[in-house]
Amino acid sequence: MCPSLPSSFLLSLLSLLCFSPYTALAIASSPADSISNSRSDYHEQLILRPLPLSTLLASFNFRSNTSLSAFEAHNFRFFPRSLGQILEHAGTRELHLRFSLGRWDAESWGARPWNGAREGGTGVEMWAWLEADTDEEADRKWLTLTNALSGLFCASLNFIDSTRTTRPVMSFQPEGNHIDANATNMHLLYGVLPHEVVCTENLTPFLKLLPCKGKAGIASLLDGHKLFDSSWQTMAIDIRPVCPEDGECVLQIEQSIDMVLDIDRSKRPRDNPIPRPPPAHEMKCNTSKPYHAHDTCFPTDSAANQDWSLSQIFGKPIKGTCPLTDPTVSPVCIQVPDSRIVFASEGAVEKKNPDQTSRCFDFPAENDFEIFLPAPEAQDGSVVIEHVAKPETPLLYAERSFTGHGQERGGVQTILRNPSPDQEVEFIYMESLPWFMRIYLHTISARVDGQPGKADSLIQEVYYRPAVDRARGTQLEVRMTVPPASTVFLTYDFEKSILRYTEYPPDANRGFDVAAAVITILNKDKSGGNGRNSRFAAYSLRTTTLLCNLPTPDFSMPYNVIIFTSTAIALAFGGMFNILVRRFVAANEGPESGLKKGVNKLKAKLAGILKKGRKESAPAVAAEEEKKAW
Amino acid sequence: MNGGKVTLRRTAGLYAGAAVLRLALFTLFPGLPDLLTGRVEISTPVTSFKRLQEGLFLYNHNVSPYDGGVYHQAPLLLPIFNLLPSFSAFPIFTYLLYIAIDILSAHALLRIAESGEAGSSARFTSPRRDKRWSGAIVAALFLFNPFTIATCIGRSTTVFTTCAILHAIANAISGRPFHAMVALAFASYLSMYPLLLLPPLILLCYDRQKLPATGAPNAWIKFTATMVMDVFGALAVLFQMSFFLTGSWEFLSSTYGVQLTLSDLAPNIGLWWYFFVEMFDSFRSFFLAVFWLHLSSYVGGLSVRLRQQPLVVITLLLGIFSIFKPYPSIADASLFLGMVPLYRHVFPLLRYSFVIAAIIIYTTFLGPAFYHLWIYAGSGNANFFYAITLVWGLGLSLLVCDLAFAVLRDEWEVERPEMAGKEIRQI
């Protein structure tokens, strides 16, 4: 759904249209107007990294700076004006926005790109530091911000209400350099919409924020069909003030898109999209298996070594470079071992990095650019794994799931595995749960796999803000450690509440999405001290979202229930009322009841008429008429 | 003298038996307490022991238990349970507390039964009064009622309210109006709805005063004013203590506000939850008002019509509350069913005793089954359980009406002794 855009946004769009990239190019490239920092004000880079199991991680990164003075003077060059005005209006000092889909398979793909700093849980996630004197003012500004961003990004961000907003205490720290980072007028608000389906209508405004609008440079590869067809993708926007040691503070906007593409799936032709098993003679068998014979075949992971090219995967080559980008940064890098052959299109310059696992390409701005990776030659059928850079082991593996069954109560179990043989991991586990999951904090416990009994000493600190019905969600932050080479189970119980029937979505039996848990691994190396050089989080990761089934009433029944219950109450009240107000008499006493009296009267009358009829032999019609008169 | 000793020994044996049975259930089936605590028929949002534990946990960790949607019980329960050794380490102390509360309730019921108030009050003496059960039998029927046992094992905090109500009645009968009012204040503090028992309880106290009422025409006004002041004074003290304990007044909206507005719609055996799940939003507050008005409308009518027998009014009101209060559980039904044997003398006048017994047994077995079908098996829907709650409500209301009928007929037969055993009707 796309709420109507605010008029100021339309205005800013118009102004952006007048400011076309080509005029910008003219300014930037004219030697007379050599602004010292214009060259580093914008850069973009695409990093391709083949992953095991025939997948490819593509990380797009776009970064532009504007000096704070220019920003305050409303002098927008690379910084998108539409976003800038919103930030200024809502008093936002730092903003992080994430649109994500899919699941990062850490077991096969290893550590996350950017150490997890540029990703969000499934759906939409945003957090921001707002400048406000009171909590109420911060809430007001947050509301303004979410509503404005909702219009800008065509996302349901305006549904981030008080039940979906929390104020994390331990999990987040400002990434930028704020003069007064700990000042009381900085409010961190965090909102999450796990149910939001990220799609093309979110990508279009995302690309519009780029100086080249996705028409040139690496952004020309981005296309909704491919992006949202990937196994995992996350779009991130981070805006933060950065103050270099020397020089003026700048406001930095960093936009990044990370996606994991299934090469087989991407290469499948559009007109024949249904995957079919290859015919027997085309199957590649793993001959090292003992049961390999002429009639049995264990398929090799042949796809891992498949050849691919950019235009096969993205459907088109890169359309030159964005003329505004910093020429010192190579636009495309690929992380494969140096031993692997990579063909690039004509005119491109290959630069191998000294680490022997990656190389970058520079190419002329006006040419299309294409990369082709031929399939490495398999040596005697054995799997050639070294043709893919070895995935880095993440600091922590985390999986979260529900336990128990039924729609009454359940438990949440998070399995946290520390792969390191000798280093313990300290992290903050944050959950923001909907209010209708009533969690019982007294049941929270940790258990080390393979050891009997609880290990609650691993939980070092808990920050808990309980939910209030229909007003606030649960916020739970747990600082805990996982000992080296061990697996810890963190569990707690919750109860599912039944809602008013108008509070259920139309697909009530699908369940309710529960936002991903955010795990922030703390940086042990705190030598920086002031937070300027050392990042607060060494690594962060999100679990998958969960689907919580609530008990549902019968939606077709409101009238019936009102009628039945009212009847039951009326019966009880009526019965009681009758007993209390009526007098007792013997069965044969007192005035006769209405019906009996009537029947008796009628009997007497009939008897009289019959007698009369026999005596006077009057016509039966008269009797009939008499009867009718009754 | 000897008879008294025998009775005493019988009573002690009865209590010991009840305690041993409960202790055996607690210790021999360690999974049973948690199983019963999870049952919607026993634990409601305002009485659940699991929620009490959560409240206690938050209270001990300096988080206000009322700043959340889980704990809706009275603040004074927190220090009481806090004084006990930790539940997770020594559950036996909690078990013993619940057993003691049950026995205290049974003892109060025994005192009520021994007083003979049910058969012959200050203003009315039933011709059938000789046909009654001894206090030990009434107490045994309460203590060995499966509903009472299940409530005790499920550790629902309703038992405290039950105990307070029974003590209020027992004290009123034994001519200690101040004690009765303090006990009633406790019950109201814990569960709010017992405050509606105030008018009949004042009548009971007034009838049972030690000193015969003086000739002054306005003596009853003074008496009533004193009683009302006693209750509200005791309540004010309790509220003030709660305020000091929690440091704010937010417990009021969290404990009593939830009962008034039914913001937690957890299923229970009452009629409110499904009605307000299905209610249209614009009519919600109207029907809340209607339901509360309906609940309180019985007090006046019954007190006036059964002025001669205030204990009957209290019994009938307890029956009505166990059907129509916002979060009823079988604990409320067990209190009402514990009071019914006091009226052994009017049992022959009950018209539908078989139907009522059949309905109660039928719903007792079918309720959990249908709940399972809805929540766990998925082969039924909410209407299954709702239908059973309707039948349960109708069955209990039939019992309340039938008991009212029997008592009134008993009263009427004082005027018309010749009508005993004859067919009668109401006009």
Image: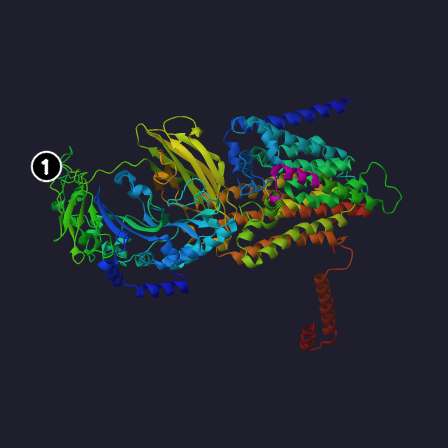
Instruction: Judge by depth and name the residue closer to the eye, B343 or A103.
Output: A103
Counting from the top left corner in percent of width and height, residue A113 is at: 28, 43
**Amino acid type of the residue tagged 1 in the rendering:** Asp
Question: Mark 1 falls within which chain?
Answer: A
User: Is A115 located above or below residue A587 in the figure?
Assistant: above
Q: Quadrant of residue A456?
A: top left
In the picture, the quarter occupied by the C terminus of chain A is bottom right
Q: Which residue is mark 1?
A: A380
Instruction: Judge by depth and name the residue closer to the eye, A206 or A591.
Output: A206
Q: Is residue A542 magenta?
A: no
User: Is A556 located above or below residue A437 in the figure?
Assistant: below
- The prevailing secondary structure element of the residues shown in magenta is helix
Residue A607 seen in the figure:
yes
Residue B125 seen in the figure:
no
Instruction: Judge by depth and name the residue closer to the eye, B235 or A472.
Output: A472
Instruction: Judge by depth and name the residue closer to the eye, A100 or A453.
Output: A100
Considering every residue shown, the one lying at the far front of the view is: A32
Figure label count: 1
Q: Residue at x 70, y 34 (%)?
A: B109
Q: Quadrant of residue B107?
A: top right
Counting from the top left corner in percent of width and height, residue B277 is at: 53, 52
Counting from the top left corner in percent of width and height, residue A181 is at: 43, 44
In the picture provided, is A347 more to the left or to the right than B140? left
Helix, strand or loop status at disc 1: loop
Q: Which residues fall within the magenta stretch?
A: B236-250
